[in-house]
Amino acid sequence: MTLQKILAPFNLTGEDLPGARPVTAASFEWLRVLFGFILLYDSWSSLSIADKTEMAHLMGLPMSSPALHVTVILLTFMKITLAVALLTGRGIEVMGWAGVAFSLLAWIFVEHGGSFSASGTDPGAGAAYLVAFLFVLAAERAKEVDISRNEMFSLARVSFGILWAYDALYKLQPYFLTHYMTFLTTAKAEAPHWLAGYDQIWITLSLAIGPSIMAWAVAIFESLTAFGLLAGHRMLRALAPIGFVLAFLIWSGPEQFGGPYHLGVSHGPLHVFGTAIIYMLALGYVMVVYDPRDLFNDARDLFAGRRQPPPSA
């Protein structure tokens, strides 16, 4: 009840109907399980030498320090515990908030709030995981209230919108707009041989359409997705799939499908299965409520209504 009172002045009291579907908690279960498997992979990769090196640098300790090894073991245990909770559906409310706190601390103290500079626009994986755990809590809240009174879903949606807006702001900066091809060619150079051909397709396509057009398209679509998430309008039924495709292109390109798949995997300081896949996961929660299929249903109903003969006098 306290959280409801805190969120009420910000109009975060639930999703507006009929734009949002009145779904049940069961509709989100497959997303929770998928998140659990991703965390299991993250737990495995956190045992890598790269992760230990990052932690040693963060703590200012040598690699041989017992305190370092204990810290790595405890953090890995925390990830495994969160993964088990997600996979089994047990203790979700407690572990969901633990995941929020864990992700926030990782984002602040490990990723330092993301990496934004002239050459990069990365909000950090910790912020994405935090939003994902908010959606997990929102799904758990759906067991008690319908979506129109689910304040946790509204909080998760708006938090996700802020994250997209944070990223879109930097996509609108001159460096990204003028160096779009640099990001693609760098990704290809760092990709394994089996993925280089895939990256080349996007390089060729971008050159054919025009690098500036592609860069502006990415910036505009990210901005529109952020606006839709912040507004919570039925337009999310169209914007969420666009954001999903954009996130997939980032995950499959620059993030190399979350690979390489061995100890030593490195996607930023947290060494996770890519960041964009968590965006895709969160957008999955959004699309359960703002189902894109409703667009076709509305169009069909509108077309059927126009075809009906006028009532006789």
Image (cartoon, helix red, strand yellow):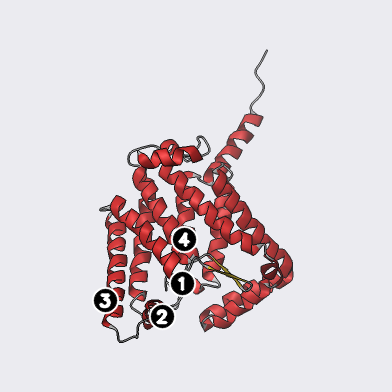
Mark 3, residue position:
70
Residue 177, quarter of picture: bottom right
Q: Is mark 2 on a helix, strand or loop?
A: helix
Q: How many numbered marks appear?
A: 4
**Quadrant hosting residue 119:** bottom right
Q: At x 27% / y 71%, what residue is drawn?
A: 74
Q: Distance between the residues labelled 1 and 4?
A: 15 Å
CB under 8 Å between discs 4 and 2: no
State the CA–CA distance, disc 3 to disc 2: 15 Å
Front disc: 1 or 4: 4
Q: Where is residue 171 in the image (x, y as percent from the top left)?
A: 64, 63
52 left or right, relative to 180? left
In space, the residues marked 3 and 1 are separated at their CA atoms by 27 Å
Q: Who comes first in sequence, dot 3 or dot 2?
A: 2
Residue at x-position 60% and y-position 79%: 186
Q: Choose the circle earlier in sequence order: 4 or 2.
A: 2
Label pair 3/1, CB-CB below 8 angstroms: no
Give the amino acid at mark 2: His
3 or 1: tag closer to the N-terminus: 3
Q: Name the residue under label 4.
A: 128
Q: What residue type is labelled 4?
A: Ala
Work out how far the residue at label 3 is from the one at label 4, CA to CA, in angstroms.
Answer: 26 Å
Closer to us: 62 or 95: 62
Disc with the residue nearer the chain's start (2 vs 1): 2
Judge the density around disc 1: few (<14), some (14-19), many (≥20) Cα neighbours within 10 Å: many
Mark nearer the viewer, 3 or 1: 3
Element type at mark 1: helix
| Tag 1: amino acid | Gly
Which mark, residue 258? 1
Q: Report the mark closest to the observer, 4 or 2.
A: 2
Rounded to the nearest whole Å, what is the CA distance between mark 4 and mark 2?
23 Å
> In 3D space, how far apart are the residues under numbered discs 2 and 1 (Cα atoms)?
24 Å
